[in-house]
Image (spheres, grey):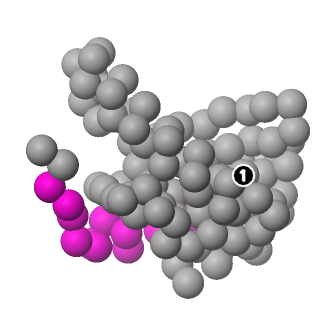
Amino acid sequence: MKIDVLNNIPGVIASALVGPDGLPIESNGDGGEVLAAELASLRTSLDRMGRRLGSGEVTRLAFTSDRIEVVALAVGDFMMGAALARSSDTRAAQQALAKLAQEVDSLPRVDRS
């Protein structure tokens, strides 16, 4: 599985790769399926925000809640991300996601017109 590498990063509790249809291709960890569903929803919002602001495609997202840190990347038609325990250093997860993005970017794209 492509996202298995994220499991070895300290603090990662869930990870997911979501396809262009919004369905999870892969998910790991406690809450991985939920993360996948939320990443699909976020993708729709990010696309809309980029269009409305005229800013172009939003490709990276990071946020912090009371309990977790989430880092996510939009790559072509795919969305992938990791949820980490709060106050975890997210740099290793961000670097791993960037490397995975190169692999995922070579997957077939879907026409969204």
The magenta stretch spans residue 48: no
Q: Which residues are magenta?
A: 96-111
Q: Residue at x 56, y 84 (%)?
A: 1
Q: Residue at x 68, y 44 (%)?
A: 70
In the image, residue 8 above or below residue 45: below
In the image, residue 51 above or below residue 76: above
The quarter of the picture where the C terminus appears is: top left
Q: Position of residue 51 (x, y in %)?
A: 25, 24
- For label 1, the crowd category at 10 Å Cα-Cα, with few meaning under 14, some 14 to 19 and many 20 or more, is many
- Identity of the amino acid at label 1? Ala
Q: Position of residue 29 (x, y in %)?
A: 77, 68
In the image, residue 73 above or below residue 29: above
Q: Nearer the viewer, residue 104 or 31?
A: 31
Q: Which type of secondary structure does the marked residue at label 1 adopt?
A: strand
Report how many numbered discs are placed on residues in the image.
Answer: 1
Q: Residue at x 49, y 72 (%)?
A: 25
The magenta stretch spans residue 102: yes
Q: Nearer the viewer, residue 113 or 107?
A: 113
Q: Residue at x 50, y 42 (%)?
A: 41
Q: Nearer the viewer, residue 45 or 85?
A: 45
Q: Position of residue 104 (x, y in %)?
A: 37, 69
Q: Quadrant of residue 33?
A: bottom right
Q: Which residue is mark 1?
A: 83
Q: Position of residue 30 (x, y in %)?
A: 81, 64
In the image, residue 71 above or below residue 36: above
Q: Nearer the viewer, residue 22 or 15?
A: 22
Q: Quadrant of residue 6?
A: bottom right
Is residue 12 something that shows in the picture? no
